[in-house]
Image: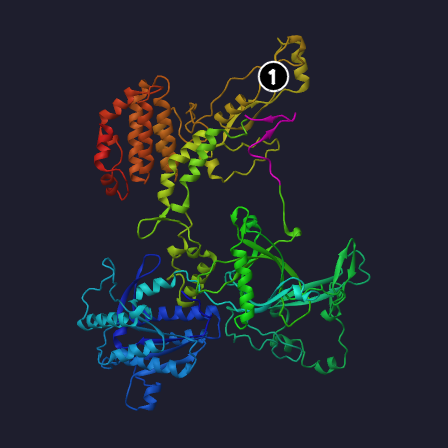
Amino acid sequence: MPAERSGYTVTMFVIDVSSSMDRMCQVELSDGRTVDISSLDWALKYVKLKVQDMIYRGLKTDKCGIIVFGSQKTNNIINEAREGEYEHIDEYMDIHQPDARTLAKIDKLRPSDDSETSVDPMDALIVAIQTQADFLGTKKTWTRRIILITDGETPMELEDWHLTTDKLVQDQVHTVIIGVNFDEMDEDGFKEQDKSTIKEANEEFWREFEARLNEDDRELGMLGPLHVALASLSTPDTKRTKSTLTASFLRLGDVDTRPEEALEIAIKTGKCTALARPKAFKKFALHRDMRPLDEDGKEMEPNLPDVKGPNVYVPLSSESHYYVKDEKDEDDEGGDIKKEVTQEELLLQVPSESQARQRGMDEEEDEEEDKKPEPPKHDGREEVSKEELVRGYKYGSTFVPAPDNLFDPLPTKPGMSIIGFFDSAHFRREYSMGETYFVYADPGQASSQVAFSSILRAMRNHVGKDGHSPLMAIVRWVKRGFRDRVGGDPIMGVLAPCDAEEDEVDFFMFMQMPFADDVRKYTFPSLEMLVSKSGEVLEKHPYLPTETQLDAMDTFVDAMDLMTADEDDDGNPKPWFEPNESYNPAIHRIKQAMLHTGVVEDITADPCPPPNPELLKFFEPPEDMVEAAESALEGVRTALNVRAVPKRVAKARGDGHHHAADDSEDADMLLEDKEWTVRKRSSPSKKTQLANNDDEDEEQAEVPEQDVEMAPPLVQEERLLATPPPPLGPKSSRSNPLPTPARSISPPGDDGAMNIDRGVAPGRIIGTTYPLEDFKKNLSQGDVVSKAVEDMGDIITEIVLGKFPHKRHGEMVECMKAMRDTCLNEDEIVAWNDFLRELKDKCTEDDPGNVDFWDTVRQVGVSLSLIGSTEASKVGGKSKIPDARARKFIE
């Protein structure tokens, strides 16, 4: 699509206000509720959103006008010239730059009360064409748009309508026809029931009208229903605009001292990319029912809106005041102090008119005129004007003044100067910074174009020792107008020649590069080489990846390759991510919220709709790829022995305080928010230990018992196993005897009984002791279905392939039934099918294997087989397994 200038557009809205537009329509809101709204109000919502978009951009050359037809009033440019023709067509709003008053006037539109008033939409379209042409005159560079909105219930005279389309084509007017409850062209789209004969005929005509406008690939016409047009407004849209070209020079060599050996080419530069930011918010304050007054009692802010009630918000403005410390204030480190005073403070500090009368300001006015005002004080500091200040730099503990024009500017010359050339293969793409620019030869100078193209093609077609190797140029650019010879700050960058078609203009791309001061270098330890403290290079170490681990990671990376994750219309692979289709969520979501809030009267009753799917397209990787890469990911987990590490439990504090509970999901999942409290004797004192050393037969001194928070048993066990035992030696060589370990006490349960170790391994939520009970308990507690299914599969495999599995065959079958039922109803079908395939492979292997258990599963039948497509569709799920394959799998 060719780029257009920003603004320079006149949009005419042609709105049907006939009595039929008062008919009620059922409209579905974003929260799923359905409300009744008139056809006109529904159509005006689209018009206001389009007008708001113009206000949002804030371009003075973006103008609009509104023409209504079917009203009882007649006011249009053709009727004024030919009285009695084109009646009941009103130029409701002249062509102007829209603002808040435009929206307020649109809200006042109402359907006509006269049901006998009938206006042909084609007449209103002709009036819009003439009004637009009369406003623009001979401005051919402006874009012309007409948007006609109707319900299609008005009879039309279809004579000579081809003349209207010919005029639209001649003036290059982009015409959009929007119909209330018009049928969608798709077979599965919306179709209105019990449609009138007039509306059916009108819809058929508008389709023919659109087709004629689009003949010869003109793309000037568009037709669609109103609900589709409203939905399209939430689609992210980026307007590709032409950059303003700036004149400059491209120099090769020293044009001042050796002009015969140098070259100076007139060029034009323009932005290729520019950083886009969300709309900035302004601060507002609640305006109290008063006005800030000056010394004469007059309003200091006459432009503020009229205030009739207390709940009025006004935008805040800020002012800068400068203060200098008093000489007596020697403890203050600062010099000048800058303070910002907001309008809110002014509103609160300045007395109102009534307060002024109460204080007798009017009576003392004459006395104040004779007095000389003193400089204002603020915390003992005197206020100074900005003109009395000079710039300075902090040098140690003092300040060095540096007034303006104290230092001479750099002796630079505006324009681009080529420093040298290098092979494009050596270009560091990560060094590119800032915005990118186009660099063209000046279109008005033929000699510059020839010289420019010669340099560019020589760089692009350069042949080195190893064959074709394009070059890039290192340039220094001073961004100043070429007529301004005052030096400016230079920037360094590269010029890259671009491949242009035969009929296109040659151009460079300029990319800014960093200075040496801008580059940040960080060093990281090697991931492939490890050196011991003795200087020996280690080839095998737990910190060094093995070939198996590297192969597993390579397989996973290849499985997540997005360059072939999507398909085009012909079925050929193509990249899944397209930068041109990736939009900034912050910009478009804030814009959607602002426009919606400005249209609806009650944001609670009609909340902001959800983001457009195009905005969320690249938030998550494609599901098919994630599902296909699951096996590769499992290979990485196995090769790297990936396990969940439980969080460290905080030690008890002796002051009676407790640490705040961790809100982490991992901690909740692993520890289940249980506090383990056991009785434990405190450690004996040093004196008691010495006494025990002298006489081991004597009883230890009794010490009071205290409650101490302990970690869960599994964590305690891990710590005990991880703690190395003390070195053994002769009894006489030990300074202290080894302590006798106390009997382990299991934490009590909720019913007071002693808990049995459930065999829950670190990182799991299901144990080996009561797996089915743990599985059901976790499903009832929260949204941990995926974790519970994963752990249940691991537990079943571990028990079946472990020691003495035949004693628990029946229990494992019941676990598989519960797991399969959960996977079927909780959209974990892929997890079940992958688990069952892996279980069958491991059971039928020779080592360790468990053929007897798989025979038991086969006897159960299809109820434990793979989940097929038919079974999955019954519960709203999807499965790629055919039913025949699922039955054959268990046979």
Magenta span of residues? 523-540
- Which image quadrant is residue 502 in? bottom left
| Above/below status of 143 relative to 183 | below
Q: Quadrant of the N terminus?
A: bottom left
Q: Which residue is rendered at x = 66% and y = 12% of the image?
A: 734
Q: Nearer the viewer, residue 756 or 543?
A: 543
Residue 274 visible at all: no
- Which image quadrant is residue 215 in? bottom left
Q: Nearer the viewer, residue 230 or 542?
A: 542
Display colour scheme: rainbow
Q: Nearer the viewer, residue 245 or 709?
A: 245
- Which image quadrant is residue 122 in? bottom left
Residue 843 visible at all: yes
Q: Quadrant of the C terminus?
A: top left
Q: Nearer the viewer, residue 349 or 864?
A: 864
Identify the amino acid type marked 1.
Pro
Q: Which residue is mark 1?
A: 726
- Residue 643 image position (x, y, % from top left): 46, 31
Q: Is residue 527 magenta?
A: yes
Q: Which residue is rendered at x = 56% and y = 55% of the image?
A: 472
Q: Which residue is rendered at x = 38% and y = 57% of the image?
A: 612
- Residue 27 image position (x, y, % from top left): 30, 63
- Residue 745 shown left or right of residue 151 in the figure: right
